[in-house]
Image (tube, coloured by chain):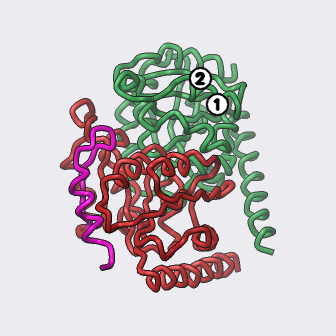
Chain colours: A green, B red
């Protein structure tokens, strides 16, 4: 019976997620669900990426956190609309939370929605939030074993952003091991190496965004 | 009704956790539940700490991961007994998993049990696994905002190990901000700054372990 309850929750979530996807599609908005460990650099990447996007790309951001509005405030400084969801303990966003947050966004003024999930390499992967693509941010300082240790997360993403490559020289991160693990889990994923600190790799990230928004 | 089901699960877990605590106490074993983000350095800290412990401290290690036995293999190289729990998707250990793992440990040969939880700043905090003390590992590279963004995790711990302090100079980590946030959430927590890479701070960590195992 416990399983049935869980399955009902997930079914309700999937229905809402499809509603969100349809609403965004009808408004010409592509959405990316950005996931990753706490401190992997999700917000820092958005802070650097957003000002680099060409004018025809008009983003808004939904920030998901257990507590605080710090991240939405950081994003708002880039000049785009940002709204914060506080999950009050939950380790992931769900479709109901995202649907509520979308009400606050003027969808006719944007064509790209970044949804930054709660910092977590596990829970967010179980919940469709109406996104078109999933992105995971993994950082050099977390170590090269993350794809094989968190396979469900890495399996479901289109793009892996490997952040903090400015720390590569200083660390014992084995890039070959990371890539080997990822290939086993998700051979089709694109990998982009960046440093949100120095800006390295962001031109490729801008290109990826341009290629992956619905035209 | 959904809430009742969840509450039943938690009640069952708490009963088991108390059983574990009693079993360990009867055998003179103290247990620490070590939590933290993926890649914060939980295993690296144990790898460096265990060989530094005085002879009268006899540890064993339970490793919790979603997948792989990598961490238990790393720990086994230090010469102590290590066993791996794979949670198959779950974002935290629970008391039933730990109880099963404890069956494999010769409790009369140890007096300290390290239980390394799944890399996650959210889920593990909700589950008592029969530990005597909770420890969270947070690292410089994760940023100084983690206590206020993951308050439930930081609230429940006796010790915060701030790892990767070798990266302090290179990063924009604001130690004062970290401490201020932590004081708000958990003013009584001890903070120890270490680098599992260079070994800095480990003498203080050994001292903390000695002071916190039941004599």
Q: Are marks 2 and 1 on the same chain?
A: yes
Q: Is residue B91 above or below residue A113?
A: below
* Image point (30%, 79%), residue name: B215
| Circles 2 and 1: CB atoms closer than 8 Å | yes
Snapshot quadrant of residue B101 = bottom right
| Nearer-the-camera pick, A101 or B98 | B98
- Apparent side of residue B111 relative to residue A97 in the rendered image (left or right): left
Snapshot quadrant of residue A171 = top left
**Percent x, y of residue A150:** 61, 44
Q: Which residue is mark 1?
A: A182
Quarter in which the N terminus of chain A is drawn: bottom right
Chain identity of mark 2: A
User: Residue B183: in sight, yes or no?
Assistant: no
Look at the numbered disc 1 and give the secondary structure of its residue. helix
Give yes or no for residue B214 being in the magenta stretch.
yes
**Percent x, y of residue B147:** 34, 56
Q: Which residue is mark 2?
A: A191
* Image point (59%, 57%), residue name: B84
| Nearer-the-camera pick, B65 or A39 | B65
Q: Is residue A71 above or below residue B157?
A: above
Give yes or no for residue A194 being in the magenta stretch.
no
- Apparent side of residue A46 relative to residue B87 in the rendered image (left or right): left
Mark nearest the camera among 2 and 1 is 1
Disc 2 to disc 1, how far (Cα)?
A: 9 Å
Snapshot quadrant of residue A73 = top left
* Image point (64%, 58%), residue name: B90
* Image point (54%, 45%), residue name: A117
The residue range painted magenta reads B189-215
Look at the numbered disc 2 and give the secondary structure of its residue. strand
């Amino acid at each position: 019976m416990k399983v049935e309850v869980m399955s009902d929750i997930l079914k309700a979530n999937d229905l809402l997620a499809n509603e969100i996807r349809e609403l965004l599609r009808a408004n010409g908005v592509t959405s990316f669900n950005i996931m990753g460990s706490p401190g992997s650099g999700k917000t820092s990447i958005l802070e650097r990426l957003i000002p680099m996007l060409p004018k025809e790309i008009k983003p808004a951001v939904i920030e998901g956190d257990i507590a605080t509005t710090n991240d939405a405030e950081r994003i708002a400084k880039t000049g785009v609309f940002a709204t914060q969801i506080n999950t009050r303990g939950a380790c992931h966003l769900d479709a109901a939370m995202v649907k509520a947050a979308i009400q606050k966004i003027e969808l006719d003024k944007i064509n790209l929605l970044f949804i930054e999930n709660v910092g977590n390499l596990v829970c967010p992967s179980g919940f469709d939030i109406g996104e078109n693509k999933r992105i995971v941010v993994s950082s050099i300082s977390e170590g090269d074993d993350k794809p094989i240790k968190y396979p469900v997360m890495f399996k479901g993403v289109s793009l892996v952003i490997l952040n903090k490559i400015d720390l590569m020289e200083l660390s014992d991160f084995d890039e070959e091991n990371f890539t080997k693990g990822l290939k086993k889990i998700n051979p089709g994923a694109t990998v982009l190496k960046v440093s949100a600190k120095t800006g390295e790799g962001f031109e490729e990230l801008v290109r990826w965004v341009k290629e992956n928004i619905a035209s």
